[in-house]
Structures are given as structure tokens and as C-alpha cells.
Image: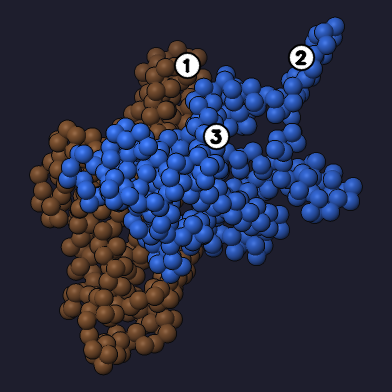
Chain colours: A brown, B blue
Amino acid sequence: MARYILGRLAGLVFVLLTVSFLTFFLMYSTPGGPFDELNQPLSPEAKANMMRKYGLDRPFYVNWWNWVTKAVQGDFGMSYYYPNTRVIDLFSKYWGSSLMLGFLAVAWSFPLGVVLGVIAALKRNTFVDQVITTVALVTVTVPIISLIFFGIAIFVIGLKWFGFNNGQPLYQQPPNAWVLPAFIFGLGTVGSLTRYTRSGMLDVLSQDYIRTARAKGLNRTVIIMKHAMRNMLIPLVTIFGPVLANAITGSTFVEIAFAIPGIGRFFLESIYTRDYPVIIFTVIITATILTISNLLIDIAYTLIDPRVRLGGGH
Amino acid sequence: MAVQNLPAQGATSARTAARGTPTMTYKPLSPTQLAWRRFQRNRLAIIGLFIVLIFIAAGVLAPVISPFPYDKTNLFKTWLPPGRDPAHILGTDELGRDILSRLIWGARVSLVVSLAATAIVVALALLFGFLSGYFGGAWDYLLNRAFEVIGALPGLLFQILLMLLIGNGILQVTIAISILGWPGLARLVRAQVLTYKERDFVSAARSLGATTPFILVRHLLPNIINPLIVAISFAIPGFIGTEAGLSFLGYGINDPLPSWGKMVGAIGRYLSSPNYLYVGVIPTIALALLVLGFSFLGDGLRDALDPSSDRARL
């Protein structure tokens, strides 16, 4: 186990190094820079000074390595656009809204998806199942910008139930500002959870031990609650990783559409201003969350399900 | 399609049936015919196929059937709601451009991007899937590392950075989509190759002197095609959504070409009045319809092509 985790951690380091290298390459190769006329009107001499101060006159791989050596000590540098502000401080200022949005979305969509999936599996191939699976397919495949636009057209402009955000952090707002965004952000999760749970449940229901339980005359409720549900929940652990990572990193589109000051929206602003330290930090923190949640889920899975052995070939 | 080359479960059962009734002339159904029968039984799949074909026809015939050039502005006829002017059935936008024409050309853009991305992704997936599944070793190692790194990249953020570097345009969006899309499919191909390469029919072919390319094309490819088709039909909606999303944010299709995502994004400034809503609602509906068409089609294909999937056995 320890050896497996060490191996995975080494892989994680490799992945994060590669991701940060790629990001540095893209940022430095992109036309435009943080101290261009557009972002900060400076005289040519002042610009050259600034460039030297931040090391922007050096090639990207040099700066990448400098960044790596500082990042491992927890120093992610200062923002170029907001002077004398640490990237981490900026980021934590915006992260609250994204986190709140994400967790609200998971809080309603995860349980609902599981319940709908179980119902669909138990009522397999009936009208109820057809309705649930079709709705799930719709919410999974319709692009988020369509969902957002329908939501805004119907609930904000048509019925006037909700409003747009006023740019303040989400947690300082009345429910009016966060109910609709959290609803829209969660829709996709409901759909994928429903589909996943349904197929997992059908899988479990076709197992021998369920037939045995039925044959010895246990009643249906006991079979479903005690035998089927417990085993059905195991594969759900694997999908909880991506769902959680998604919730933590937020939804850029929802934040843009509802003017929520979250990290997705902040990332786009930093791209406009070519605020390299903010861009790299956002990318790397998202990548870290994705990879670590995957690792944790894999470990949790083996603890829950003794049939799975770690690192056991293909 | 290479569906005919499947190890034919369907044909076997048809043959047993034929043996059972020796006096009747019973023509066994080919696997393709069986698949088509299963496909037809799924009403949603037929609807999906119908929707997709209509959009493809609209996209192919765009230069012929669109009533106006997509970029023709008419400042005397701005904001015409649908149905007001017989010349502009779906109305005009803020610059007096005909919405129907832009919708039709938007279908072309959307389909060209998603289908071109599919072609690239499939080519890469087959290449690397074959190499790593059949030869293993270093290829396997490379594919796994690529899978890990690309899987850890925050998709949207990375695509935006990439688009900044390579610029807006159809080809560029296609590249940005393909780069992130192939490793998942390559793993699918690899898994299929691993499953089949040790089977007796492959060993038999090899012992008869079949060359590796022959085995790959003649014996392995036909077994990979079906799951690949299913995976692709579910991936295409994602590609369409990604294009629309990038264009919505301004990092997608270049002006003056229309894109549904761009049409939705452009309405953002005018959302204060419900009178202008139609400009965004129309492309949103088109986007949702096309995407749903593809995923209903994919659902039907899965049931039709994979006899072990849970609906196929009905």
C-alpha cells in the first residue's frame, strides 16, 4: 500500500511539472504581455524595467524552473496587475464564491441523482424508467451555455423569480442570487449520477447473491436496502472524485453568465491582463485538485471494496 | 461499416433457428440487419437520426438554402422579431443580419468542427491505441503518461490559453478540441486490442503467416469499431458544446463566420429587455436539438451494436 501511494505521488509530481511547463510555454508564446500599452500604460524605459524586475526578459523555461523552486516552498508570487498583492490572497478572495456554488450544486444534485438512478433501475423498462433516463440524457448532453440561457430566459427575464448577481461574493447574497446558478450547475451532475447509479444498480440486481436472497424468501425492501444498495454505493465512490473536483474548481460559464465573482471569471480577467502568476496558479491548483481527488478516490475504493487490489496490473 | 465482420452472435442464433425448422427456407439475418432491427425499435434513436440528418443537410446546403449571406448587415432592419418581416422568417439581430441564415451557417460551422475533431481524435486513438495495446512497452508507457497529463489539465482553461496562442478560427478550435479528446478513446482502443490479441483467431491467423498490419486491420479493427462508434456518438455532443462554449467566451470561431455559441454570447449585453431575447433563444434551441439528436442516436447505436447492453436483450 505504502509503495503504491509513493508511486502514485511520484506520478503526480511528474504530471504537475508537465502541466506547469506546458502552461508556461503557452503563456510566454502568446502574443501580448502583462506590461503592454493595453494593460499598463508605461514608457518604454519603465516597461523594460518592469520586464526585468519580473524576469520577463528571460526565456520561459528559466522562469518556469524559478517558479517551480519557489512554488514548492509555498511561494506563488505576486500579481502583475494588482501590485503588492499575493496571488494566493487574490485567489482565496474569489474562491469562496466558486466553492459555495459548487457545494450547493453537489448538495442537491448528488442525492437526487442517486435516488433517481435507483428508482429507474427498480422500475426498469417501464414508463418511469424511460422518463428518468431520457431526462438524465438531456441534462448530461445539453451544453451548459444552453442550460444557462434557458434558465435566464425563463426564470430571470420571463418569470422574474431571480436576479443576476451584483458582483459581490456569493456568500453575502440572499438566496435569490444563488438558487438558479446552483440549480443550473448541478443539472449535469444529476444526469450523470442517475445514469451511473442506474447501471450500477442493474448490475448488482443481476448478481447471484441477490437471487439467493430472493430465493430464501426475504422481502423486497430488505433485499434492496440491505443487499443491493450497499454494494451499489461502492462504484459511486469513483464518480464522487470528478464531481467533487468539479465543484471545487467551479464553473466558468455559470460565473460569467450570472456575474458571480468566482475563480473561473477571475481566470478570464487574468487572461485579458496577462497576469501570468494568477494564470499559472489557477491552472496548477485545478490540476492538483483533479489529480489528488483521483488518487484519494482510488485509495478509498480499495478500503471499501476488498476485491480491488492496488497496482495490480491491467 | 465493418459491422459485418463481428463474431456473429446474432447469426449463430439465426442459424440454430434455421436448423430447427428445416422445411422452411429461412434466410439468416446478418449482424448488420439485426443491429438495424434493434436500432429501429428505439423510437428516440430514430428521432435523433432524423434531427442529425436535417442539420447535416442544412450544413451541407448552407450556401444554397440560406436566404442571405451570413454577414450581410442591414442597419435599417435591426432587431426584427421572428415573423415580422416575411423576408426574415426568424428575424434579424442587432446589426440587421438574417438570423435564419446565420443559424444555417452556424450548423455548418458546428458540424465541421465537431466532425473534423472526431476524425482527428479517432485517427490518433487508433494509432496510439494499436501501438500501445499491440506492442506495449514504451508505447504503453507513453500513452499512460499522456493520458495522465491531459487528464489533469483543466480543460476549458487550457483550451482558452491554447486558443490565445493559435488564434481564433475553425481549424484552431478543432485542434484545441482534438488535443484534449484523444487519450480517452485511445485507452478504449487499447483495452479492446488487449482483449482480442490473445484470442485463438488471432493466434491462428499469426500461425498461418498473417502479417501484423493484416492482423490489425482484418482481425482487430472490426472488433474495435463498434465500441468506438458508440463512444464517438457520445463524444460528438461534447465537441459541439466545447466549440459553442469557446465561441461564447470569444475564444472560438473568428468573425464574421457565425457560430451558435457566438450568437448566444452576443446577446449578453441586451439581456435587460425581453424583446431581444429571441436572438439568443433561437441558437440555444438549435444547439440543444443537435446535441440531443447525436446523443439519442448514440443511445440507439449502443443498444443496437452492443448486444450485451442492458436494453438490447429485450
- Along the horizontal axis of the image, is B55 left or right of A135? right
Q: How far apart are the two marked residues, 1 and 2, measured between alpha carbons? A: 33 Å
- Along the horizontal axis of the image, is B138 left or right of A185? right
Q: Nearer the viewer, mark 3 or mark 2?
A: 3
Q: Can see residue B33?
A: yes
Tell me the SS state at disc 1. Answer: helix
Tag shown at residue B53: 3
Residue assigned mark 2? B17
Image coords of residue B66 (percent x, y): 47, 42
Residue assigned mark 1? A214
Tag shown at residue A41: none
Residue placed at 43% from the left, 22% from the top?
A130
Do marks 1 and 2 share a subunit? Answer: no
Q: Judge by depth and name the residue closer to the eye, A119 or A303.
A: A119
The chain holding disc 3 is B
Residue placed at 40% from the left, 67% from the top?
B164
